[in-house]
Amino acid sequence: FIMCEYAHAMGISCVGLSNYWDTIYKYPQLQGGCIWDWVDQGLLTKDAQGREFYAYGGDFGENMPSDGNFCINGLVNPDRKPHPQLAEVRKVYQPIKIEAVDLDSLKFRIINRFDFSNLLDYNIFYTLQPDVAHETPKHPNDFLSIPNRPIIGFLDQYLAPHDTAYFTLPESFIKQWIPDTVLPGRDVMVNFYVVKSDRPRSTKGEVVAYEQFKLPVPKRKPQGANFGFFTDSVTYHWEGTMLNVNVGKVEMLFDSKTGHIASIKKDGIPVVVDGPRPNFWRPPTDNDHVDGHGELLWRRIGLDNLKYHVFDFRIEDYLRKSNREDLLITVSQSATNENDEHVFSISTNYRIKPSGDIFIFYHIDPASWVSSLPKIGVQMKVSDELVTTEWVGYAQETYKDRKSCGFVGHYEAPTDDLFHHYVRPQAAGNRMQTRYVSLFNKERERMLSAQIEGRNCQFSIYPYSDGNIEQARHTNELMQAGYYTFNIDYAQAGLGTATCGPGIREKDLVTARLREFSIHLQVGENDLFEPYFVDKVYEPFSIQRTTCRTINGILPAGKTGKRQLVLKNEPDAPYNEYPEQKLSNGRIGNPADYHEGWVGFYGKPLIVQYEDYYFFDDSVEITLSFAHHPSQWVFMPQKVTVSYSKNGKKYSQPEEVALPFDPALKENDQPRVCILRHKIPVSGVKFIRIKAEPVEKLPLWHAAAGEKAWIMTDEIKISTR
């Protein structure tokens, strides 16, 4: 047990350790070695092409005990390379803490969190960063390297264990290095470092603690934003359904069918090969797989496979008439999921300036039934020639609930280095508090810069597609996509601890509500991208509201007037509260928590009748929703039938609803939500009866074979066509 716990803490797979003595005979090369030899030799594996990867639970045969990759998801890889979480642990556990008391007066306090040690062996000093964005960039792994310059001061502190002291930085010393005012958005940071060293007033040694504070320096009066690396006119022409826009050496191709940019080139060289497009999805993390507000819910909403429908694509000329020479393209579209349910209304305004700057203003309005999202932002595919990434923001991988270690600076790294390869591939490399991010080619030419106007953003970039990351179980299954996937995010959900603890906290969720933000792109070499532009460059454009079939766009169900939904048998506790309301309120149930919006029947059928005394004067479509989660004893019904009547007395013969798969087969054991549809071809129907019969018994392959199965349903929709 101790060995397994140690292995787990170190990120080493202990799959099979409990069955070690049986396993050692199965793998003769392990005989005669210590347990760590077994771990190292048994996990580092090669595929048929000779590519190395680390194996984990499920890779050692069907009869081996396994908990998937749970026992190989610690703070370091099996080769001892740190995971990004280790930086967060180091920061949270640091034994010396410095807090701001009053930043205006530069007053701070220092806390000795040691139980037995004073601070005599520690040098505590600070440095000043008067202009983070214009510093020489460094590699993010060097974020704690001490700057070699005179903007430095030492604090002499003798502090007993668990004691607290207060100090004030010399205002005159700081003011000589910064002006009275700075440009809006410019960062002035003071950084503290605590170094364990045997030499007094030395910066050499191990950094055991650090803090960073942004000083509240007065801002200058905003000036007009200075754009551009050229000031050519913006021209455009149509090539079939594609709109070709040219400004200077930059060519943009818009697809009027999708409403998105199809490509951006400079001097004929591809820079962006697709997008940017609105994006609400991330490849699920280990926690997302089991979080109550994670992957199952997000896939039910359909965020992994949205379809976009353009309702309006137009070019606005009024800006040209006012001699501003900007080109404005407005697009109105809706996004639906594979069930044809409306998910988002999206209005997008593209503003292209003669300077070559591209501003994209998004107005994103989710449907009322959508609850939470993994992220809100844009995604584009950029050329794989953009091999270097530069940014101002946090050095490390950070998320909303894992950002204590964040350290703002000016960083640069090979683009391939910015994705962390977990043993099981998943979303990685997100960096918060980003002021801007730029991509460079092999000749060190700045080819693309991006920011969210007026606020910090998050970004990630990697040489794989999201789909490849989702499907890969091991790192050897990751395949170069031929482009970089580049994400600029307005908001992103936290990570939570659902694999062995609570899920994402409510305050760290991305709730579905109206959002507006503006992305600013620069294509080509330019002066340093300012952290923020001082003026908003988008205007309150009129928003084209889209109309389309929505999840609520159905005939009223429930006890509304002469229409009512009536259950003919009682649901079972604890899924029996307000059942008719849950089945007709237009809100989906959470597939990761059956207490949220579901009605359940244990070992008995669902029988429901829909009554409409005004009758349907057209053909009717019925839409049913059932959960399928065998490990939770929840199965899609084995059989679903529909019968109907014009008078409530004589019903049609039951018509069987087509099922997408056999729920009793083990090959269909993955959790999902199943949407069933059935059309009633005749008109004048007033009564509809629906019966869903459960799987008779849990199948033989199930851990509880022979027991009864649950039917879980959350919505019954009746609509005319």
Image (cartoon, rainbow, N blue to C red):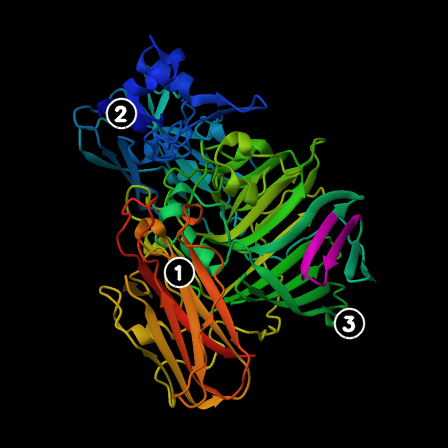
Q: Taking 194 as reference, is 342 left or right? A: right
Q: Taking 704 as reference, is 529 left or right? A: right
Residue position marked by numbered label 2 in the rendering: 18
* Residue at image coords 64%, 55%: 225
Q: Which residues are magenta?
A: 249-264
Q: Taking 358 as reference, is 396 left or right? A: left
Up the image or down, 327 lies above or below 613; here it is above
Find residue 689 and report its horizontal and vertical position in percent: 40, 78
Q: Nearer the viewer, residue 295 or 437?
A: 295
Residue position marked by numbered label 1 in the rendering: 638
* Residue at image coords 65%, 57%: 359
From this viewpoint, is residue 324 visible? yes
* Residue at image coords 38%, 37%: 405
Up the image or down, 223 lies above or below 147; here it is below
Mark toward the viewer: 3 or 1: 1
Q: CA distance from mark 3 to mark 1?
A: 65 Å
Mark toward the viewer: 3 or 2: 2
Q: Amino acid at mark 2?
A: Ser
